[in-house]
Image (cartoon, rainbow, N blue to C red):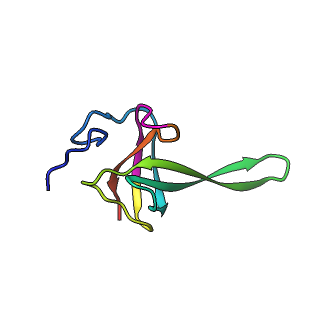
Amino acid sequence: MECTDKRCPIHGEASPRGIQLTGRVVSDKAKKTVIVETESASYMYKYERFLRKRSRIPAHNPDCIGAKTGNLVNIAESRRLSKTKTFVVTGIVK
């Protein structure tokens, strides 16, 4: 299968740069878009505890990668692809 997607990080023009994250795909309902949820922890000095934070990032999902719900994926920042998408899926971890 030959990839003809212009926004593909491997075969297209959207070169990844900047932030690189790993997260779990929680939704793949939109066309060529996945919602990736990343988790982080920050320390709260007042309570002397760690606070768990989650963020949901829309990312472009090229046909040659084809991530599905439940996959652990790597995403990287790229140029602005649409109103909400500034990240692109670069690979599936497992």
Q: Position of residue 3 (x, y in %)?
A: 19, 48
Residue closest to the eye, 31 or 39: 31
Q: Residue at x 40, y 35 (%)?
A: 78
Residue furthest right in the image: 46
Residue furthest bottom in the image: 70
Quadrant of the rendering where the N terminus is positioned: bottom left
Residue furthest front in the image: 31
Q: Residue at x 32, y 35 (%)?
A: 14
Q: Could you tell whether 48 is left or right of 74 in the image?
A: right
Q: Residue at x 50, y 55 (%)?
A: 35
Q: Is residue 44 above or below residue 70?
A: above
Q: Position of residue 69 (x, y in %)?
A: 44, 66
Q: Could you tell whether 33 is left or right of 57 in the image?
A: left
Q: How many marks?
A: 0
Residue closest to the eye, 75 or 41: 75
Q: Residue at x 41, y 47 (%)?
A: 75
Residue closest to the eye, 78 or 39: 78
Residue furthest left in the image: 1
Displayed quadrant of residue 79? top left
Whether 79 is among the magenta residues is yes
Displayed quadrant of residue 93? bottom left
Q: Position of residue 57 (x, y in %)?
A: 53, 49
Quadrant of the rendering where the C terminus is positioned: bottom left
Q: Which residues are magenta?
A: 74-82
